[in-house]
Amino acid sequence: MSRRYIIAGGGTGGHIFPALAIAQAIGRTEPQAEILFVGAKGKMEMEKVPEAGYRIEGLDIAGFNRSSLIKNVGLPLKLVKSVWQVRQILQRFRPHAVLGVGGYSTFPVLLVAQWKGIPTFIHEANSYAGKANRLLGKKATKVFTATDGMEAFFPPGRICITGNPVREAITGTPLPQEAARSFFGLQPHRSTLLVVGGSLGARSINAAVDAGLDRLLESGLQVIWQTGKLYAGQARQRCAGKSGVWVSDFIGQMDQAYAAADIIVSRAGAMSIAEICVVAKPAVLVPFPFAAEDHQTVNARHLVHKGAALLVRDADAATQLVPTVVALSKDAEAQEKMREQLRPLGIRNAAETVVTEMQASLQQINKTEQ
């Protein structure tokens, strides 16, 4: 039987790229399977998913705006409209299973699927589950989690610990470092810093790198700098005429970027942490302080306590980030110790585990119904 799967979610790369990794794993085990993504109109999944070769439909849905309550006036109407849109999508596509990976579209898609009795699955990337996933998890067929200890949020019998799915390009055989540096137009034998603030950028990281760029270059580092869209113009002006720096709003070839890097500066979202562990590169983490329940700081401290990363508070980035990076770049022993601690933490088969468990659940449901 050729199954049909819906994967719902998006908003950031931390949701989109694990979803794509799972879709790829489905394709390897069920080549005849049909996969449809459902996202939020205007969000990055509407661009990135088709680029990866998958169909996607968009909903008129938005999240709760914590910074401006007045902007939430139309939220109930959007939710009602998105529920109607989901009903139409489910009626047309008739999925055998629906998987939510987080983001605005996850809630209405899984909610309607559960109303209709369609098997639903959740992947919770963080160590602290959001309210929507906690509500949906009560009726989900299975909840896939990145870590243990999630019984506080989900029914214990529904939990399956899988880790966080990482893109196939990153989990594969590492690319040659010298060739990767040349890919970005950098010197093949010079130590390289990779700066990523997440797919949407990070203001504190960008400002610190902007102010300290000359010091980074003078220290002997060359820089691959992903800025996000909002800071890209300013960063390009800052880098104009300088050698030893590559700058862009988005890096489409993260496998090349990770291969080129000796040190990484990053936020501490669940997927960033998962990828850093897989590539085993020393990192200076700057957690986003306004993430729900400050879960990025929890993520970062998990690595710091193992001696696998360094942490700079967002509020201290302006004064501490660049000096911390420069000091680490000159301490080869500290870098090697971090790599040793990171290697056993990298989970490369999370996407395959999610798909295997999902397929096993669907088979069991079919047996029960027969």
Image (spheres, helix red, strand yellow):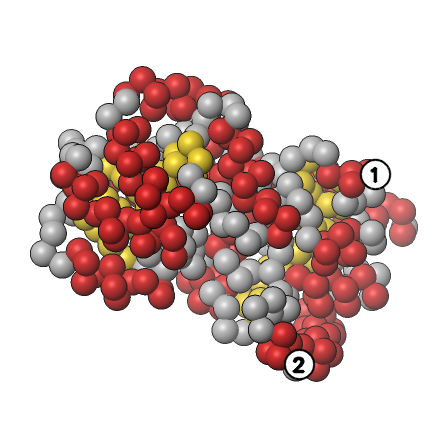
In whole angstroms, how far apart are the C-alphas of marks 1 and 2?
Answer: 38 Å
For residue 255, say whether it is visible.
Answer: no
Q: Which residue is drawn at 43% across and 48% down?
A: 315
Question: Looking at the picture, how far across and down is residue 43, in whole percent?
Answer: 50, 68
Q: Which of 292 and 90 is in front in this view?
A: 292
Q: Nearer the viewer, mark 1 or mark 2?
A: 2
Where is residue 252, by image quadrant? bottom left
Q: Which residue is drawn at 38% across and 57% down?
A: 203
Q: How many labels does the image show?
A: 2
Q: Is mark 1 on a helix, strand or loop?
A: helix
**Left or right: where does residue 33 sit relative to residue 166?**
right
Q: Can you say whether 235 is above or below 159 in the image? A: below
**Left or right: where does residue 173 sit relative to residue 50?**
left
Question: Residue type at mark 2?
Answer: Val
Q: Earlier in the sequence, mark 1 or mark 2?
A: 2
Q: Name the residue under label 2.
A: 73
Question: Residue type at mark 1?
Answer: Gly
Q: Residue at x 28, y 49 (%)?
A: 209
Q: What element carries label 2?
A: loop
Question: Looking at the picture, how far across and down is residue 156, in whole percent?
Answer: 82, 38
Q: Mark 1 points at which residue?
A: 157
Residue 266, label in figure: none
Q: Can you say whether 163 is above or below 52 in the image? A: above
Question: Looking at the picture, how far across and down is residue 260, in whole percent?
Answer: 27, 38
For residue 193, say whether it is visible.
Answer: yes
Where is residue 36, by image quadrant? bottom right
**Left or right: where does residue 36 sit relative to residue 166?**
right
Q: How crowded is mark 2: few (under 14 residues within 10 Å), some or many (20 or more)?
A: few
Q: Which of 92 and 230 is in front in this view?
A: 230
